[in-house]
Every structure is written in C-alpha cells, then in structure tokens.
Image: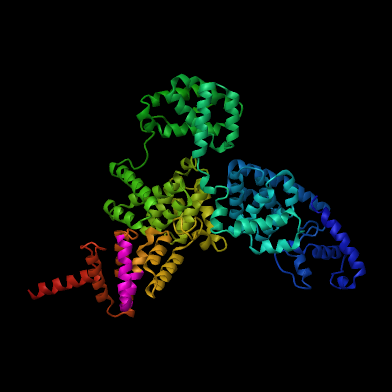
Amino acid sequence: MEFNKDQVTVSSSMEKTETDPSCISQLNISSPQANMAGDLLKSHRHIFPIELEQGSEDDVLTHPDFDTAEGNGHSDPTSFDADLTEYKKKATIIVEEYFGTNDVVSVANELKELGMAEYRYYFVKKLVSMAMDRHDKEKEMAAFLLSTLYARVIDPPEVYRGFNKLVASADDFSVDIPDAVDVLAVFVARAIVDDILPPAFLKKQLKLLPDNSKGVEVLRKAEKSYLATPLHAEVVEKRWGGTDNWTAEDVKARINDLLKEYVMSGDKTEAFRCIKGLKVPFFHHEIVKRALIMAMERRKAELRLLDLLKETIEVGLINSTQVTKGFSRIIDSIEDLSLDIPDARRILQSFISKAASEGWLCASSLKSLSADSGEKLLENTSANVFKDKAKSIILEYFLSGDTSEVEHCLETELNASSSQLRAIFVKYLITLAMDRKKREKEMACVLVSTLGFPPKDVRKAFSMLIESADDTALDNPVVVEDLAMFLARAVVDEVLAPRDLEEVLNQTPEAGSSVGEKVIQMAKTLLKARLSGERILRCWGGGGTETNSPGSTVQEVKEKIQILLEEYVSGGDLREACRCVKELGMPFFHHEVVKKSVVRIIEEKEKEERLWKLLKVCFDSGLVTIYQMTKGFKRVDESLEDLSLDVPDAAKKFSNCLERAKLEGFLDESFASESDESQSKKQNGSSLLSG
C-alpha cells in the first residue's frame, strides 16, 4: 500500500505533539481520528496546490485534495484499501484498452461509470507511468487524453495530485526505466503547456523534495530543458510526434511490406508476428483490403493470400467485424478498381463466395455487388466536375494560404443557387484537412469563417461528414474527435449557432447514429468547458500557419499589424517593416495590412507618403498579392460609412487613394468603389430626367 511512509510520518508527528504545547494548541482534539488527520496534514502540506493559512487545517480536511488514509476522506483504512485496490485494477484495464483502441470517448464514459472521482489522481499516475515505458505513440496518446479529460472528467486537483505522486515516485521509475527522468520531465512540461498543470507546480515541488532525489531532476529538466527554450510550446507538443502523426500512412506501408514478404516467403508465423506487432486491431480491415487487392493483381499469389486471411480469422488475430469492413471497402471502391483490373468485380465475387463457403465471412452482411454499387450521391456531371476543381482549389490554398484567391475561384464556379456545391466544398475542405497537420486544420477553419457561406450549407456539409465518418475512420481513427473539434470551432467562429448542432444531427440521413451522436456530444462538451472559446480557438495553434508566435489568434495578429504600422510611420525602417509583415506568417491575412495602411492614409495626411512606399515595396516584392491588395481596398470601401463619422471627407480621400493605387498598379482599372458606383447611377438618373 502507498501510505506506509505516511504512517511513519504520522508517528513522528504525534511524538512531537506530546512534547510541544504549541503543536497541541493547533490541533482539533475532538477525536483520535481528528488528531491523526491534523498531524497528517502538517506532514503532507506539500500535496496541496493551495497555500494554507494558519488555523485553516479544518477547512482543508474537507478539501477534495485531502486524504486521511492516503487521502480520500475514508475514516476506515480497510474500506479505503479495498476501494483503491479495486480502482487500481479497473484503471489498469482502461489504460490498456485505450492504448489498443485510441478511443477517448470510451475512456471518458468508463471513468464516469466507474465513479470514485476521489481516486482519479491514481488514474493520472497509472496512465503516465504505463506510457513512460512504451513508444512515443502511447506517450502522445497519454498526454492527449489528459488534456481532453481535464476539468470535464478529471477534476483539476486530481490532475495536480496525480503529477505530485508521479514526481515523488521518480526514484522508483528510474530503476526500471533508464530515461525516466527525461520522459517524466516532458510529461510535466507538456501538462504545463496544455494548461492542465499550473507553472507554480515546479517551484512548489522543488521546495518540498530532497535535493538529491530524482524528482528534483525531473522538475529542473522540465523547466530548463523544455519550458525555458524558444518556441517551447511547439517543441514540447511535437516531442512525441503530436497527434498529427496518427495518420494511417505508416501503418499502410508496413502492411504492404508484410504482405509482400509473406507472398515471397509463405511464412505464416512471421506474418502473424508482424500483424501483432502493428498493435492496431481497430485497423485490421486495412490488412483484409490490401490482401484482397494484392490477390486480384497477383493471381498466382491468390491462394496463399486468401489462406493467410482465413487462418488469421481462425486463430482470432483478425475479428469478423474487421473482415466485413475490409470486404465492404473493396465493394465501395470496385468502380475505381475496375479501371486497373477489368475483371475486378468478377474476381471479388469469387473471393466472397470462397470465403463464405469456408466460413470466415458472413456474405449476408455485405452490400450488394451490383453494377451501381460503387456510385455515390450527386452523380450529375456538374457536381463531379466541381469536386475535382474543389480539390485543386483546396490543395493550392494549403500551399499559398490565400483566402482571397479561393474566393475569386469560387465566384466563377458558384452562384446563388449552388447550395449543394457549397456544402460539398466545405466537406472536401475539412476531409482533406483532417488527414494533414495542425497548420492545414487551422487554415480550413479560417477559410470556412472567411467565406461566409450560409449556415444551412455548412450544416449540410457537417451532416455529410458525419454520414461518411465510418469510411473516414478507416484512414483516420480519431475522426470523431476531429469532427467534434471542427464543429465546436465553427460555433466559436460564429459560422454556426449553438442550436445548429442538433440540426446537423437531424439532417444526417441516419439520424440518431452512434457516430453522429458521439460527434455532437463531444462538440457540446468542448463548448461547455472552462475557457472553451479560447481553448478551441487555439486547438490547432491559431493563425492557420506556422508563425513565429504559435497560437496567435486573428485579434492578436491585428494588434501586431497595428503596432508595426505605428512604429513604421513614426520613423521606423522600411526593410524592418517588411520583415515584420513577412514574419506574421499569415499571407492570407495581408489584406489587413492594406486596410489599416489605407485607413491611416485617410486619417493622417502627413504620413501618407511613407505608407504608400510601404505598400509599393510589399506589392513589388510579392509580399502582398493583388488579391490581398484588392480585398484590403474593398474592406476600406465597405467601412467608409463608419470612417466618415471621424473623417467627414473620407469618401473623397478614398477615391484619391483608388486613383493612386491604380496608377501604381496595385489595383485593376475595373475596380470601383460602391460610393462611386452609386454616385454614377444618380448622375445617370438625373441626366435622363433632364433629357
């Protein structure tokens, strides 16, 4: 039991009370148990994340962080020991299953069902300690799970206490794990970066641990090696690869290799070992799919590959659900396969018949392999053509980051009645982003917010995404978590209203589906969390690109632009100003630089030449594109009415700015302000009347 050391401390503390009147006066002596609790409190002040004032022991005795017999308010040590032992067993099973399935929602539900919230500090300790001795994937999974469960399932004091226990046990970990100090230091640093552990944790624990303990080494390494470095947040988050590396590409490559090796050697034992080594039981359908395709392509290896599948199922290595999924995926893609393998449909039918007759496939659970089975919704030509164009536009956007270019391209493809096509575009955008890194995910959110599509089109897009989530999960095991985050972000960005969440589920063809309900429930949970808006805005770093200030929100970037312009107009260096614009790392947001510069030209006549020079250099060097320049002027034009309240002749000054911008080549000659157009219409109308 973990409280043996505490018992020794209690004994020594009680001896002190017998001889020290000052100690006796501070204790609650109403009962023997209270005496013991008060003494234990004094000997364990370091476990509390709160500062204690003199005479506050009684308050803390009822605090959730305080424990009487290893801490959970149990007056009966026997009852406590039985409960904790039971909790430890179940916590270990939950962690083991999580590392195998990567199902965050399942862990949250199991912890809630298990109850005993006062023991969740042990779950934190167990999760991290088990991950420490595993691969980087499990370490990242553990860090991600803690961040997700924080404050939603596991109370902050329990997380604090769990890390307290981990640091205190560093000496024990070092016996079995050679790099325990470094690994635990990264976990502590990651917890601080993820805002689930206060930075003050380091200093408080340093004061309370022996100088020569491994725990002190852990805390110092976390502070000096990980938290004191430049861009430490990004470094710590990517220490174990980050959740961005959880794509299926590496696993697919290994599956291909093991199947090729097996075809050449015929060694089933080695093939079984490799399949077990993948440690992705939820992804075994990929083995089935690739084995079937390889059997179609290499007819000589057909019997060997089908025999491998049969035996993996017979020995329980691959379950029947994964087999059905593998065959279903082939059926869904049979049209594409037929382009490369003309007899693909006939061959697959023979595979299904063989597998069913041998008893390792339930043919009745498969879709029909009819001529139209591979066709999807929206078969009309215009929709299919748009899909190809949309994919091209999105991929180009991920490279350039230019939202104005996307808007320009969509203007030529969409019209007011293109509701379905707008939904398709949003669906493709999020689908492509989910298989990429945080940068692209953030850029997708920025683009959805910038495009300003009607809410009903965005709702339809999410309904389509939820409908196809099962298929997406084949390549992206964390699709539910990703979709929930995209949906929550859409609400935070005011693209959708909170009430739209239920509407998204209702619009899904399979309303009430488990996937849809999971996505909606997780999105609601994310939105209800403490400081949810800020956390969701920064979920993928903010800013949409790899900036020098990861996590910058749009508002923060606007402030930076304001500051750099103020410094420049007050005598700053032109080259330095251009460097600052570039280092914003947000080329799709350069229209804000243009807008603020033009507004300053209108407001401050004496500074205009410096600002024109800045715009010219930015434009000539390609730092600001013509689309960004045009959008910047368009935004000023749209805000002229408000600007005129402070500058009465703002419209006239803006017209002069337009003329000069066209002269400098910043704008196309066809660009005209709304005020000029309305004035022109009035003049035409009056001339007609006079005529």
Task: Please state the extent of the stretch shown in magenta in the rendering.
Answer: 596-620
Q: Position of residue 101 (x, y in %)?
A: 59, 42
Q: Which part of the image, by quadrant, shows the C terminus?
A: bottom left
Q: Nearer the viewer, residue 600 or 571?
A: 571
In the picture as drawn, the residue positioned furthest to the left comes out as 691
Q: Could you tell me which residue is drawn at 92 percent across and 69 percent down? A: 19
Q: Is residue 691 left or right of residue 485?
A: left
Residue 608 is a magenta residue:
yes
Residue 585 visible in rendering: yes
Residue at the image position 55 percent from the left and 31 percent from the top: 320
Q: Nearer the viewer, residue 80 or 562?
A: 562
Indicate whether residue 641 is drawn in magenta: no
Question: Where does residue 343 sit, x and y in percent of width and height?
Answer: 37, 24
Q: Is residue 514 above or below residue 365?
A: below
Q: Nearer the viewer, residue 213 or 686?
A: 213
Residue ranking furthest to the right = 19
